[in-house]
Amino acid sequence: MGNSLRDELLKVGLVSEERLKKKSQRPKRSKAKPAKKRARAPTSAPTAIEKSDEIAKHVLRENQRRTARFVRDATLGGGTVAENAKRALRRRIQDLVERERLNDAQADVAYHFVKGKRIKRIYVTAAQRAQLSSAEIVIAALEGNHHLLSPSAAEALLAMAPQTVVCGGAETDQDSEEHPVPDDVIW
């Protein structure tokens, strides 16, 4: 009965007699526990070169471990390194806007300005309206929202996010000279 599978394989031709004989000649493993290894005799103290090699190997393993952790954290954190950099930039922009923003929640004066080919509106206070006309503050349009910022904050924002549109400031004399009012116009 123990050889029934063997006999079937021989009949079908999947196994040859020679192969079965080779298999039966292999020494069988015993299931006994392996003998304990003998303790090695103490060797001489490691030399300075061996110590430096060990230190170099340790530093290499530590660097590989740190790199692997960085890559793992970057991928587990929700994306690639480029996506993480974009998120960090967006956070820095939001922090800058929140820190430097001059918008007043109780502003009630509508201020109209040109953004591209459209006329937009933002509510400001009377003091902010005067500052806008004298270019002491500017309007920064970022992701559909309009923020009142100082000119230096607007420049920093433009440096971080070139897609930002900065509007406002006083009209220069060049703008008024571009379309002069004729002298013969009667109002």
Image: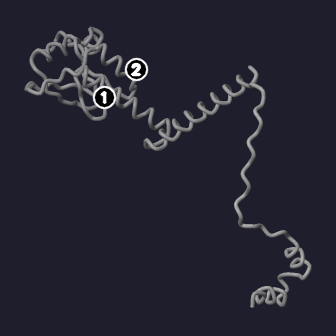
Mark 1 / mark 2, whichever is N-terminal: 1
> Marks 1/2: CA distance?
14 Å
Please give left or right for residue 29 compared with residue 78 in the image: right
| Residue 38 placement, left or right of 143 | right
Q: Secondary structure at mark 1?
A: helix
Residue 187 located left or right of residue 94: left
Q: Nearer the viewer, residue 51 or 67?
A: 51
Is the residue marked by circle 2 packed among few (<14), some (14-19), or many (20+) residues within 10 Å? Answer: few
Amino acid type shown at disc 2: Ala
Q: Position of residue 138 (x, y in %)?
A: 25, 18
CB under 8 Å between discs 1 and 2: no
The residue tagged 2 is 159
- Taking the spot 36% from the left edge, 31% from the top edge, the residue there is 90
Identity, as a three-letter code, of the amino acid under mark 1: Gln
What x and y, as percent, mark residue 39?
73, 42
Residue 58 in the image: above or below residue 151: below
- Name the residue beneath numbered marker 1: 94
Say which residue appears at 17% left-offset and 24% top-offset. 103
Residue at point 31%, 13% (across, down): 152
Q: Residue at x 55, y 33 (%)?
A: 66
Q: Quadrant of the N terminus?
A: bottom right
Where residue 171 appears, as percent x and y from the top left, is 24, 13
Q: Quadrant of the C terminus?
A: top left
Say which of marks 1 and 2 sits in front: 1
Q: Nearer the viewer, residue 144 or 171?
A: 144
| Number of dots carrying numbers | 2
Query: Which residue extends farthest right?
Result: 18
Q: Position of residue 184 (x, y in %)?
A: 16, 11
Depth check, front residue: 65 or 48: 48
Q: Secondary structure at mark 2?
A: helix
